[in-house]
Image (spheres, grey):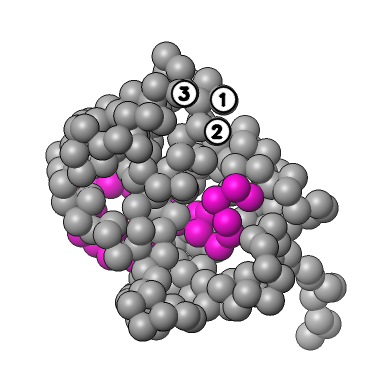
């Protein structure tokens, strides 16, 4: 079992932290202050393997770091976490740079020729950034059975060993290896982050978040 940091005290961090505790990991929830009420309440209700602290505390603690902060707040949170505390560690980035300032539907603040995943990797070159889980609701992230049958999760990152470790963790959560699609290096975050505009519209259409993307392949065309 691992020591895992969860950066962020919102619903995403709460759901992910709670699932990781259930799987037997030690989890520290990080926030901007050591006295954050949401983090404190989560730790109290989650048992002996749960604790909380600042972003710095959590980054020091975690062997693996889940970025559950909003996309817009991510870089500030990682700056507070500290470059030395991120060095050599896997950062699982599941954030999207959604900007709701002008109402619905939101826009993306980083798009086309860059992505949040790339920005994190570029800013912290000694960390091992793996982008995944950002194309679905947080409850589905931690419980793929909420959508019946086969459906896909995307993974990308520059470090093959880091991706292998993340894939193994995804397996323990319930994601079948056959449903994990490795897109390649971290530049592929551009593609997964740009799925969010259609995801938002599907959410509006269906009225609930229990849906996901499933890539269905036919036979390769003959040359």
Name the residue beneath numbered marker 2.
19
Q: Name the quarter where the C terminus is drawn.
A: bottom right
Determine which of the numbered discs, if any, sits on residue 22 in the image. 1
Q: Answer yes or no: do the residues labelled 1 and 2 have beta carbons within 8 Å?
A: yes
The picture places residue 192, in percent across and down from the top left corner, at 51, 68
Residue 127 among magenta residues: yes
The picture places residue 209, in percent across and down from the top left corner, at 64, 61
Residue 29 among magenta residues: no
Magenta highlight range = 116-140
Name the residue beneath numbered marker 3.
46
Residue closest to the eye, 215 or 204: 204
Q: Is residue 40 left or right of residue 210?
A: left
The residue positioned 46% from the left and 47% from the top of the image is 11
The residue positioned 36% from the left and 43% from the top of the image is 9
Which numbered mark, 2 or 3, is in the foreground of this view?
3
Image position of 197 with respect to 82: above or below? below
């Amino acid at each position: 079992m691992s020591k895992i940091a969860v950066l962020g005290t919102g619903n995403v961090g709460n759901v992910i932290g709670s699932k990781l505790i259930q799987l037997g990991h030690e989890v520290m929830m990080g926030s901007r202050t050591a006295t954050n009420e949401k983090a404190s309440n989560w730790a109290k209700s989650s048992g002996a393997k749960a604790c909380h602290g600042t972003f710095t505390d959590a980054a020091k603690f975690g062997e693996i770091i889940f970025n559950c902060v909003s996309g817009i707040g991510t870089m500030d949170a990682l700056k507070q976490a500290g470059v030395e505390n991120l060095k050599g560690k896997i950062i699982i980035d599941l954030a999207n740079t959604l900007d709701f300032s002008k109402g619905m539907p939101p826009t993306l603040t980083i798009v086309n020729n860059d992505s949040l995943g790339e920005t994190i990797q570029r800013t912290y070159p000694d960390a091992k950034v793996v982008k995944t889980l950002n194309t679905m609701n947080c409850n589905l992230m931690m419980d793929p059975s909420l959508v019946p049958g086969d459906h896909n999760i995307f993974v990308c990152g520059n470090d093959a060993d880091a991706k292998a470790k993340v894939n193994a963790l995804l397996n323990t959560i319930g994601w079948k290896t056959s449903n994990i699609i490795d897109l390649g290096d971290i530049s592929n975050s551009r593609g997964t982050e740009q799925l969010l505009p259609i995801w938002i519209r599907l959410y509006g259409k269906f009225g609930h978040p229990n849906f996901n993307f499933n890539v269905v392949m036919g036979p390769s065309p003959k040359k």
